[in-house]
Image (cartoon, rainbow, N blue to C red):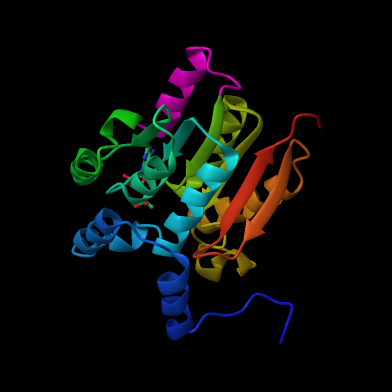
Amino acid sequence: MSNKTLGLSTELHEYVVAMGAREHPLLRRLRQETAELPQHNMQIAPEQGAFLAMLVELTGATRCIEVGTFTGYSALASALALPPEGRLVCCDVSEEWTSVARRYWAEAGVEDKIDLRIAPAIETLDALLADGAQATYDYAFVDADKSSYADYYDRLLELLRPGGLMVLDNTLWGGEVLDPDPQDKDTAALQALNQRLRDDSRISLSLLPIADGVTLARKRART
Ligand SMILES: C[S@@+](CC[C@H](N)C(=O)[O-])C[C@H]1O[C@@H](n2cnc3c(N)ncnc32)[C@H](O)[C@@H]1O
């Protein structure tokens, strides 16, 4: 026994998914359809979908934002966990990938909860801020281009209410965050972001070794 997080064998990972994630049949079908795409690794893991749904439930969120939607798995998992009045703004630049998402959202009956904005996410977040939405969101999930995470973080922290939760994906970046001299901008950006979050007294922080690393950043009421 150890007090360090277990490294998961393939079998133990399968056990986690089988015992710890009640994957909705449409989520499973979406995962199977997405597996046919060359970019399928961009999709979140099924146990992560269950975790995000749990966070949405725990926070009692009704106003949510997602940055990086792809074929819609994380959005569907979150929307299914939202109450009937819950709303999720989804930001993505791809009509093609989000057309798959739209099909599944419609089939699941959650399309009315989701407001998909096709534009660079910075533009969408800036538009929300320009509309006066500061401190009105409960929950945000970030899973898009890694080099823009710091810009998303700044804007989403403004959009979240005190006590609101931001969830950032891929913060361990396949272990590349350990590289002392990263040559690619995504690794360098994630390293800088992780340090910045560690030192930011405006948030409560927890970096979890779930999937590719999931950071929880809760906006503090007072700093
Ligand atoms: C890792 S995937 C998201 C996976 C998704 N959360 C899921 O559960 O399947 C990243 C997505 O970010 C989108 N993206 C990349 N750059 C973007 C930008 N500047 N603004 C908005 N979306 C962007 C891509 O089109 C892609 O769909």
Q: Residue 33 magenta-drawn?
A: no
Identity of the residue furthest to the bottom in this view: 1
Q: Residue at the location (59% across, 40% down)?
A: 59
- Residue 139 in the figure: left or right of residue 93: right
Image quarter where the C terminus lies is: top right
Of the pair 77 and 159, the residue shown nearer to us: 77
Q: Residue furthest front?
A: 84
Q: Position of residue 162 (x, y in %)?
A: 68, 28
**Foreground residue among 63 and 204:** 63
Q: Is residue 20 above or below residue 191?
A: below
Question: Is 129 left or right of 82, judged from the image as shown?
Answer: right
Any part of residue 158 in sight = yes
Q: Ligand 1: which quarter?
A: top left
In the rendered picture of this protein, how many numbered marks are placed on residues?
0
Q: Can you tell which quarter of the image residue 106 is in?
A: top left
x and y percent of residue 4 in the render? 70, 77
Q: Is residue 89 above or below residue 171?
A: above
Residue at 53% across, 34% down:
61
The structure residue drawn at horizontal position 48% and vertical position 84%, both measured from the top left corner, is: 9
Q: Residue furthest right?
A: 223
| Left or right: 142, with 204 as reference point | left
Residue, x 18% and y 43% (percent of image)? Answer: 103
Q: Is residue 121 magenta?
A: yes
Q: Is residue 30 above or below residue 15?
A: above
Residue 214 shown left or right of residue 110 in the figure:
right
Residue 105 pos. (x, y %): 25, 41
Residue 148 shows up from this direction: no
Q: Position of residue 171 (x, y in %)?
A: 56, 57
Split into 4 quadrants, where in the image is the N terminus? bottom right
The residue segment tinted magenta is 115-136
